[in-house]
């Protein structure tokens, strides 16, 4: 496998009221293509900050991230937008779906910004919804769906982009244990499609689904399981 990400000396701080909070402190991390990496840590440990940096949501403050051989620090804003649009899919615990749109329309919404033909968009939407097991729910809107179904729509939305990696921030936090297991099964199945998954969680259930686990505490990575940092 080749390296998808190479991260070195990542530091990130923000102000909370009058205090400076060090969210990340000297983080080094490599992620391989096809890997399912789980990042574990308590609230406030730096999990979300790290994912936001990997997903180009937060700007680099100090350190280096190389993604598929490209240095984030050397990219133009246009190039950053292209990577976010085409190569990185996002899944959040709060789903972030448009309630007035159907499941299919939610999946298609961001595809319309990729310059794809209508027929290609429709095919990707149908394939993605089938891949996550809710092809028969395409016409329903989020308020008509269960939490697990809504999270499947969010996964389908990310998958339809045909990304190199899906970044999932606490994707099972709002779900019961059975539904969480179903969602983790879906995420694990993406590996057979060549999609890398980087997920944060404090849910012990997620550990059995990862190919590698790293722990983060107070903005610093600890020892991992199933590979090296």
Image (tube, rainbow, N blue to C red):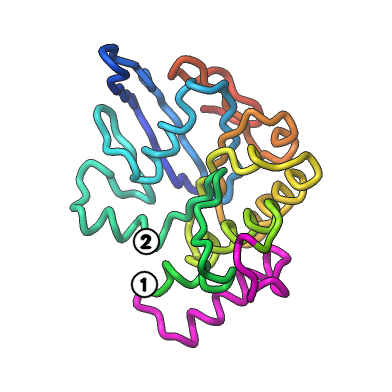
Q: Quadrant of residue 114?
A: bottom left
Residue at 69% x, 71% y is: 137
Judged left or right of residue 84, residue 122 is: right
Quick one: 50 or 151, which is closer to the camera? 151
Residue at the disc numbered 1? 114
The image shows residue 11, relative to residue 199, as above or below, that is above
Disc 2: CA contacts within 10 A as few (<14), some (14-19) or many (>=20): some
Q: CA distance from mark 2 to mark 1?
A: 7 Å
Q: Position of residue 215 (x, y in %)?
A: 57, 23
Q: Position of residue 141 (x, y in %)?
A: 60, 67
Q: Which residues are magenta?
A: 114-143
Please identify the residue farthest to the bottom as the structure is shown.
Answer: 119
Please identify the residue farthest to the top as the structure is shown.
Answer: 19
Judged left or right of residue 87, residue 36 is: right
Residue at 20% x, 45% y is: 74
Residue at 56% x, 35% y is: 200
Please identify the residue farthest to the right as the structure is shown.
Answer: 178
For label 1, the SS is helix
Q: Quadrant of residue 220?
A: top left
Label the magenta part by its dominant secondary structure. Answer: helix
Residue at the disc numbered 2? 85
Quick one: 151 or 188, which is closer to the camera? 151
The image shows residue 44, relative to residue 93, as above or below, that is above
Residue at 50% x, 65% y is: 162
Give residue 56's mark: none
Q: Which of marks 1 and 2 precedes in the sequence?
A: 2
Does the residue at mark 2 contact the one at mark 1 (Cβ under 8 Å)? yes
């Amino acid at each position: 496998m080749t390296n998808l990400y190479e991260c070195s000396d990542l530091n990130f701080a923000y102000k909370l009221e009058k205090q400076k909070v060090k969210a990340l402190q000297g983080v080094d991390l490599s992620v391989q293509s096809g890997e399912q990496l789980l990042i574990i840590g308590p609230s406030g440990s730096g999990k979300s900050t790290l994912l936001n940096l990997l997903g180009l949501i937060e700007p680099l403050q100090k350190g280096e991230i190389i993604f598929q051989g490209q240095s984030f620090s050397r990219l133009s804003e246009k190039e950053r937008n292209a990577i976010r649009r085409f190569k990185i899919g996002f899944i959040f615990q709060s789903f972030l779906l448009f309630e007035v749109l159907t499941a299919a329309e939610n999946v298609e919404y961001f595809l319309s910004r990729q310059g794809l033909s209508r027929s290609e968009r429709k095919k990707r939407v149908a394939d993605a919804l089938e891949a996550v097991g809710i092809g028969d729910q395409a016409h329903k809107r989020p308020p008509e769906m269960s939490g697990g179904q809504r999270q499947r729509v969010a996964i389908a939305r990310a998958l339809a982009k045909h990304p190199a990696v899906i970044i999932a921030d606490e994707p099972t936090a709002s779900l019961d244990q059975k539904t969480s297991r179903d969602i983790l099964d879906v995420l694990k199945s993406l590996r057979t499609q060549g999609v890398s998954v980087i997920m944060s969680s404090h849910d012990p259930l997620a550990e059995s689904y990862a190919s590698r686990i790293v722990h983060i505490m107070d903005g610093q990575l600890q020892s991992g399981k199933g590979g090296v940092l």
